[in-house]
Image (spheres, rainbow, N blue to C red):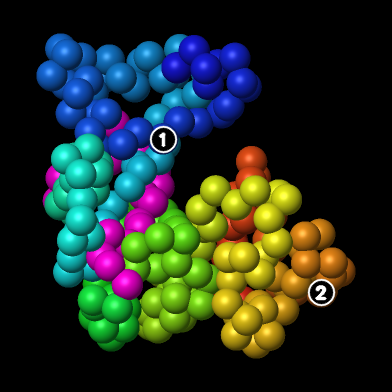
Amino acid sequence: MEAAKAGGFTALAIAPETYLDALESGLTPSDMKAMAADAGAPLRYLDSLTDWAPIRVPAECSPELRARFDVSTDHSFRMCEKLGLTSILAVAGYDKGTVELPRLVDGFGRLCERAHAQGYWIDLEFMPFWGMPNLSDAWAIVSGVNPPRRASLSMYGTSPRAPMSSICSSACQESIWPACRSMTACGGRWGNRSSTIRSTTGIFREKASLTSWRS
């Protein structure tokens, strides 16, 4: 809380294990909300949820990672309700190649429908490890959801010094998002796109893509 206040942040994320640890220490959800609000950075994000896919955690998983990721959707939504959160970060806990794309599309679509009904925003974050390591994998899931719902794409911890080519596949750079090449690291120029890709503390985030996902 103090770090968020000192850094001038306007919102905080909370992880499932942090929430449970706080409860065990005697804090109530109201206490947690008040502490964050007093620091000027109210709780807004749940970091993170893997239960949209049929496998929550990878085959090799430490107890610490299991506490973070082996959490049900029901429990996650209860956390959001009790803490007044507005966004959920969905990530892939499965190993690469262990879940077929149609099952991922169906699972993510169901999560978006449930979140939409309760007024939550979903971020799908691809990370350079586990089952969804690049933009093309994430885009295949998001673009398969019909009709599109409240969702966006996030890139995990990308350093501004790291070229997009180290994260995205060549197929993405050439066909899916030419705007990706416009980032300084790629040596390109901004194109005239209806979507906006912006850099926020090293995370590139696609907001409200070619069609309106925010309904």
Q: Picture coordinates of residue 180 (x, y %)? A: 70, 70
Task: Using residue 12 as the reference point, say whether residue 33 is left or right of it.
Answer: left
Height in image: 152 above or below 140?
above
What residue is disc 1 on? 13
Badge 2 density bin: few <14, some 14–19, many ≥20, Cα 10 Å: few
Q: CA–CA distance between discs 2 and 1?
A: 33 Å
Task: Using residue 169 as the reference point, say whether residue 115 is left or right of it.
Answer: left
Foreground pick, 69 / 29: 69
Q: Which residues are magenta?
A: 74-96
Height in image: 98 above or below 154?
below
- Which residue is rendered at x = 40% and y = 40% of the image? 45
Q: Quadrant of residue 59?
A: bottom left
What residue is disc 2 on? 192
Q: Secondary structure at mark 1?
A: strand
Mark yes or no: residue 148 visible: no
- Which residue is rendered at x = 20% and y = 51% of the image? 61
Mark yes or no: residue 186 visible: yes
- Which residue is rendered at x = 82% and y = 73% of the image? 191
Foreground pick, 47 / 75: 47
Q: Picture coordinates of residue 57 (x, y %)? A: 21, 57
Q: Picture coordinates of residue 4 (x, y %)? A: 53, 21
* Magenta-span inclusion, residue 82: yes
- Which residue is rendered at x = 65% and y = 48% of the image? 159
Q: Secondary structure at mark 2?
A: loop
Q: Amino acid at mark 1?
A: Ala
Height in image: 32 above or below 164?
above
Q: Nearer the viewer, mark 2 or mark 1?
A: 1
Q: Amino acid at mark 2?
A: Asn
**Badge 2 or badge 1: first in the primary sequence:** 1
Which residue is situated farthest in the front direction here? 60
